[in-house]
Amino acid sequence: MHRRHPLHPAPVPRRKGAAASQEWLVVPAAGEARAGEFGRHRIMEMTGLPARDLRVLDPLLSYPSTILGRDRAIVLNLEHVKAIVTAAEVLVRDPSNPRLQPFLLELHARLAIPDASIANLATDGGDETEQAGQGNVPMPGLGTPGCAKIQPFEFKVLEVCLEHTCKCMESETLALEKEAYPALDELATRVSTRNLEHVRQIKSRLVELLARVQKVRDDIERLLDDDADMSELYLTRKFAFQGVNESPGRVESNKHASADHDQEKEEEDHGDETESGHESSPNVKPDIQELEMLLEAYFVQVDGTLNKLCHLNDYVDDTEKYIEMMLDEQQNRLLQTGVMLTTATVVVTAGIVVVSLFGMNIHIDLMKDPETREMASIKNMKFWETTWGTVAGCAAIYFLLIYAGKKSKYLK
């Protein structure tokens, strides 16, 4: 008998890059930054983002610039800055990119600035909890009378991202202007293949940069036009408000545990209405003044950069129209020259016809040999009269045709 060996399932080949780790830099609100490789599922657990939002940060897919507000995080894809911001930390994609080094330095410098109002949060935490138990719900991040407003962590990171993006786009715009205006002036002075190729490359860069700046501007404008989207970016306030709303519900349920069923049901309904009222109150009229001022400042800056690019684009278009007018004028001159040469050819052909007639072997008195000296002189005189008459007639016909062309405005 043959011995049966247990069958082992063949190993399923793992898709390459399906769960590949990606390099991230985690910068907390307080503490040292740490770099590491995290898989997609790990990032989803840390931030609560769906997979489609993580695809926005994939550099291989080339998504346009965007700012997305989610329940627990903010997705930032601004030029080469790709980050996920939570209420406590920020995750920066591909920190080894040399273009990100200035951004990381600015971020560390911004977060290293001590916030005098942070200490007030720790000392006033107990007072806020007592006020919440009494029904006075504080709004974290909004400040109280007598206390300075606290800028949330996510707004600090958002400000650094927008500032770095605006600086990069502004520097690219200035460099492009510095190169484009002399090249366009040189092309307007002398049209050559080299100048045309240089201007073509400049316009390609201009169109690309213009589209990128326009996308950033439109995204900021979209946030400014929608109060609900701006309120989604208040992560610290949302988390604090959710924590405040959970504690009154628990106290209320323990207090009325021994009541009868009808009374308990009424109180629960009343409590649900109260909680829904508290939860919907910030959605009805959210306080977004701080974020609105922040976005408006950078919207003005991006709009100024966009105006410079539009002005440069208009200058390129004007130069192209000027070049086209110059080429059209040269083409018209060539056409007029061709018409004049064609007319001259026709006139010369008419003179050749006259010469051909006299060159025929015909028996007329003009063709007979002179017998005396006087007849020879007469024949010579007639010859020159015929020659100069033919030339004068051709010239008269030529000038007459040119005059007719100019009078009919076919020639200038």
Image (spheres, rainbow, N blue to C red):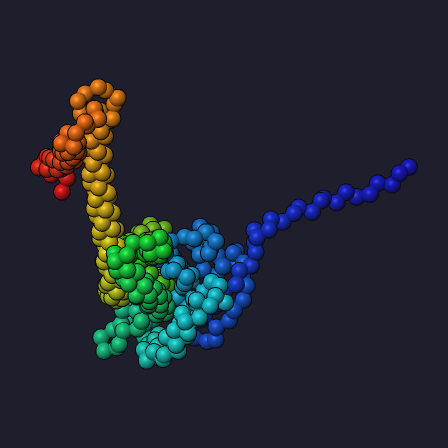
Q: Residue furthest front?
A: 372
Question: Percent from the top left, x then y, of residue 131?
Answer: 29, 70
Q: Residue furthest left?
A: 407
Q: Nearer the viewer, residue 387 or 285?
A: 387
Q: Residue furthest top?
A: 363
- Viewed as shown, does residue 365 lie left or right of 100? left
Residue 250 visible? The answer is: no
Question: Who's the residue at 27% across and 73% down the image?
Answer: 149
Question: Percent from the top left, x then y, of residue 113?
Answer: 36, 79
Question: Who's the residue at 35% across and 66% down the image?
Answer: 168
Question: Percent from the top left, x then y, of residue 157?
Answer: 37, 68
Question: Percent from the top left, x then y, of residue 112?
Answer: 39, 78
Locate the N terminus by quadrant: top right
Q: Is 183 placed above or below 388 here?
A: below
Say which quarter of the image contains residue 159.
Answer: bottom left
Q: Nearer the viewer, residue 323 or 251?
A: 323
Question: Who's the residue at 39% across and 66% down the image?
Answer: 87
Say which quarter of the image contains residue 175.
Answer: bottom left
- Viewed as shown, does residue 355 lie left or right of 129? left
Q: How many circles with numbers are drawn on the protein?
A: 0
Q: Is 217 placed above or below 331 here?
A: below
Q: Nearer the viewer, residue 154 or 349?
A: 349
Question: Who's the residue at 38% across and 60% down the image?
Answer: 79
